[in-house]
Amino acid sequence: MDMHTRVKELQLLREETRAGDGRATEAQRKRGKLTVYERLDLLLDKGSFVEVEGLRRHRASGFGMQRRKPPGDGVVTGWGTIDGRKVFVYAHDFRIFGGSLGEAHAQKIHKIMDMAEACGAPLISLNDGAGARIQEGVTALAGYGGIFRRNVRASGVIPQISVMLGPCAGGAAYSPALTDFVFMVRDLSQMFITGPDVVQAVTAEKVTHNELGGADVHANNGVATFVYDDEATCLHDVRYLVSMLPSNNQSQPPAVQCSDPADRTNEPLLDIVPAEPGQSYDMHDVIEEIVDDGEFLELHDRWAPNVVTALARLHGTTVGIVANQPRHFAGVLDIKSSEKAARFVQTCDAFNIPIVTLVDVPGFLPGTDQEHNGIIRHGAKLLYAYCNATVPRIQVILRKAYGGAYIVMDSRSIGSDLSFAWPTNEIAVMGADGAANVIFRREIAASDDPEATRAQKMNEYKEMLMHPYYAAENGLVDDVIDPAETRHILVGALETLRNKRGSFTYAKHGNPPV
């Protein structure tokens, strides 16, 4: 054969590999799923994908494996760009062995993970596989071990994003759990350690795949960061997330041109947030008013909704926002919300994203359930995360900030760079009602009119220790600001802190509460 014939042969092989088996492709479509290359086309900039090891085949024998050796071995690996920025990607091809992982399959993933880490670029996995390839035995399990080890090694070094577009069962589910962000699609993706058949065999409980490990299940338990109704929308938001993240922990998130004025006033905030501390409002409205063009990407919106965690931009700069949500449980901190916020703070700190904390918190949730399940330990996770963070940190106290929850929500005392408060702020060990009942218990009990005496003592306590300027007078708040100036002040503060450098004390690693 001459060179022209050889090239035509190569082109034909590549076309056949991309097209895949017709019956398998049809089965994929009947499941309502895109093919692996269609997914890559949606994820990456047009024409940017470069595939590596696309012709690799497995070397297994036995159980009929020697008679079926399709190129690619059920996973597509390579790199491309998102908005012109390099990313590395591996994507299971369910049409080949159900996307199951064997030795060659795993080695392809190992290679692309190593390249992503070495090049300092985000790693994105499109997961649609049936787990370990049973026909290859322990070598398949060892392949997963290599993936997990690399997930941990790259943790906090490069962004790792898992996109669940099909089943992810058994040990395979631990890789997404080790990454920074997990995307799921309703009715298409499931994650579980043991499947419905095993559950039924062991517990006699009948459960479907979606009931056991579907997207909505994991949206509620915190495994899934984002949940969508279709693949296209999901992959669109993966691109959006990447646009807000740095390529690695040694670089800054990309700044974008912003047409939203830095000094835009926030007059609506005076009506959005009631002055009365007991009245509810939606913290989403506050965030929307402050950030660029009202756009933000909320993480874990259905898990622990009493705290909001979101990525947004302030005058083109990516920021992480942690905010109490008065619409849910009055915005109290509890076990789940502490874990959720702690994880987000750690993620922001790892990837050089400044943190803005919006505070309106009545305290930690009281009760035997919380205490017996370790609220002390779990609340300490959030405290540890904030104290350990070296990125720019700005606190804004909107209304209530009581007790230990005030301290934990990035107060000046634990290292916030700047703390601002609105004129509606109430910072104290506890609310005036509770404080009066403790301090003046005997006087109230001995009074001819206990309720009138209680009200009088509450006012005394407020006037002495809870007035809006008390914390500022004592140097624990840098300034009391007009809510309408919140955006302008935050933009200026972030610009001032842009070149902040943290001081580091050597340690092999910290020992955070788990």
Image (cartoon, helix red, strand yellow):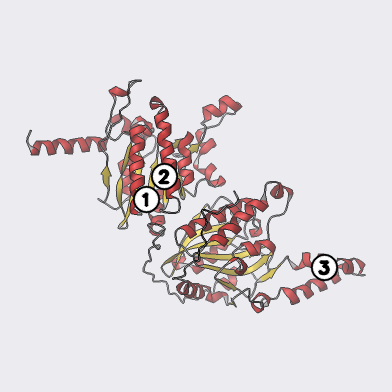
Q: Is residue 514 left or right of residue 464?
A: left
Q: Are marks 1 and 2 in contact (CB under 8 Å)?
A: yes
Residue 135 falls left or right of residue 368: left
Give the mark, 1 or 2, whose residue is nearer the N terminus: 1
Residue 150: which numbered mark, if any?
Answer: 2
Observer-nearest of 506 and 471? 506
Q: CA distance from mark 2 to mark 3?
A: 56 Å
Residue occupying the point 82% across, 65% down = 438
Q: Which residue is mark 3?
A: 439
Q: Amino acid at mark 2?
A: Arg
Q: Position of residue 41 (x, y in %)?
A: 30, 47
- The amino acid on which the numbered mark 3 sits, given as a three-letter code, is Ile
Q: Which dot, 3 or 1, sits closer to the camera? A: 1
Disc 1 secondary structure class: helix
State which tag comes first along the sequence, 2 or 3. Answer: 2
Residue at figure coordinates x 62%, y 68% from the top left: 413
At which x and y percent is residue 494?
47, 71
Q: Position of residue 32 (x, y in %)?
A: 39, 38
* Residue in view at x 53 percent, y 76 percent: 485
Element class at badge 2: helix
- Cα–Cα span, label 1 and label 2: 9 Å
**x and y percent of residue 133 in the render?**
40, 29
What element does badge 3 sit on? helix
Mark seen at residue 117: 1
In the displayed structure, 333 sits above or below 438; it is above
Residue, far bottom: 473
Q: Is residue 229 shown to the viewer in this render?
A: no
Amino acid type shown at disc 1: Glu
Q: Are marks 3 and 1 in contact (CB under 8 Å)?
A: no
